[in-house]
Amino acid sequence: MADNLSLDIKASLSWLFEEQLDLSAVSDAAKLEYSAALIDGTAASQVDKLWHDERSLRRL
């Protein structure tokens, strides 16, 4: 049986910053999105190995 690997990557970041000043309010909102699909192989934009791990992000 042959190995076959395909990979879909999707990530999204969004934020909203608001600050009330004496005479006005400042607001900034934005969103970043990334998406890619990789197929089995060893050339550019292809994948033949998989590594995974679990990490936690914490607020400093």
Image (tube, rainbow, N blue to C red):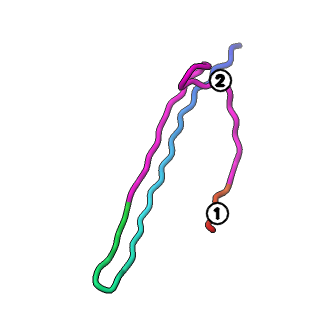
Indicate the secondary structure of the residue bearing disc 1: loop
Residue indicated by mark 1: 58
Earlier-in-chain disc, 2 versus 1: 2
Residue lying farthest bottom? 22
**Amino acid type indicated by mark 1:** Arg
Amino acid on which the number 2 mark rests in the picture: Asp
Q: Which mark is residue 1?
A: none
x then y, percent, for residue 27: 35, 69
Q: Nearer the viewer, residue 12 or 20?
A: 20
> Residue, x 62% and y 19% (percent of image)?
42
Above or below: residue 56 compared with residue 24: above
Q: Which quadrant of the figure contains the C terminus? A: bottom right
Callouts 2 and 1 close, C-beta under 8 Å? no
SS label for mark 2: loop
Q: Residue 20, image x and y in percent? A: 36, 80
Q: Residues within 10 Å of mark 2 (few under 14, many from 20)?
A: some
User: Which residue is found at the position 44% from the left and 57% from the top?
Assistant: 14
Left or right: residue 27 compared with residue 7: left
Q: Is residue 10 magenta?
A: no
Q: Quadrant of residue 2?
A: top right
Identify which residue is drawn at 48% across, 53% down.
13
Density class for disc 1 (Cα within 10 Å; few <14, some 14-19, many ≥20) is few
**Does the segment drawn in magenta span residue 36?**
yes
Please report the bounds of the magenta region as a residue range. Answer: 30-55
> Residue 34: where, in percent of width, then height?
46, 42
Quarter of the figure that contains the N terminus: top right
Residue with the mark numbered 2? 48
